[in-house]
Amino acid sequence: MATAPPRQQWPPEPSHRRDVAAYICTELRANPYTSVAQNMVWTGPREIVVRNGLFGLGSLTIPAGLCGDLAESGLSPMVSSEHLVLLALHCLLHHSVGNGINWIRGAALAHPDSAFFQSLWAQVAFAHVWPPAVGLAASCARPDIMRWCRGAYYAWLRDCRRPGAIQAALTAAQAAKWHVVAPTAASAELVRLVHQLQIACVPTASVHNVAADLVINGTSAMCVAPRDKLLLAMHMLRGDKAAMFAESIPELAEVRAGEAFAPTALGDSWLDELSS
């Protein structure tokens, strides 16, 4: 048989990875937490050979029809463990996303020198470890605030799928000096948030103070604690009144024009494979 060139991920199509993982976890009733380590981790490339319409993946025997035209192509792909990361993800997250991610984190800690497990962890770390700005915003003793931050972050992540972009947006919002006009609906909502979230802020002597975080009507200014400004930024960028704040505060409008508010095209993430 001819040998196919190496592929970035195998099976090459998302639908094939879903089908193979579903077959492993349901038809074969394999425990993904043991079968992945036993059947997808090896040294060097291995040839995937089709015999009688079936191919082997370690000790697992799988119908070649689940991989499209694998049987008809006459090719035997050379596959390394690094090519099976997304297939392993599908298996590990098939029954429970939360349990699967926890298992992957444990496996990565237990095998720090394994490129395979480190690659798995790199795919899902964003769901287990918040960006620093989100973590700081949620660092308080109020369960309602922590719960809101968690929900807002994951809703944001579902839209843009880029944790780095979320971190950059919050950092930019925190660093900017917000110019607010009062009295307006936006300024009233901002005052409400300050009271509701118990934001620590103090007036400053000059609007030209480099430490000033809020400038009201160009005549007065306030300094806000760094953690509290991040919390305000999350509410003003992702809360119910985000559009109103963007229309009223130019600095937030500039942040909202960035990458963190541009939805990622479907197919750019393994999350799309799971939800399809």
Image (cartoon, grey):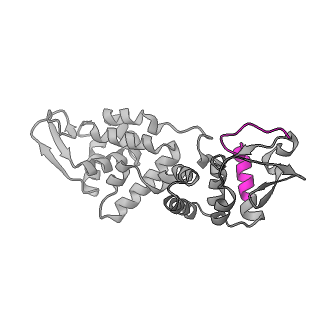
Residue 216: in magenta span: no
Furthest residue to the front? Answer: 43
Location of residue 87 with respect to 186 vertically, above or below: below
Q: Is residue 237 above or below residue 118?
A: above
Determine the residue located farthest toward the right in the rendered image: 52
Front residue of this view, candidates 221 and 171: 171
Residue 33 x/y as whole percent? 63, 65
Magenta stretch bounds:
1-22
- Residue 115 in percent (x, y) is at 56, 50
Q: Position of residue 232 (x, y in %)?
A: 31, 48
Residue 94 visible in the snapshot: no
- What number of labels is visible? 0
* Residue at (82% x, 49% y) in the render: 49
Q: Is residue 6 magenta?
A: yes
Instruction: Using the rendered view, name the quadrant where residue 180 is placed.
Output: top left
**Where, quadrant-wise, is the N terminus in this rendering?**
top right
| Percent of width and height locating residue 154 | 47, 52
Q: Is residue 209 visible?
A: yes
Q: Nearer the viewer, residue 230 or 19?
A: 19
31 with respect to 224 (left or right): right
Q: Is residue 90 left or right of residue 204?
A: right
Residue at 79 percent across and 39 percent down: it is 3
Left or right of 26 in this view: 86:
left
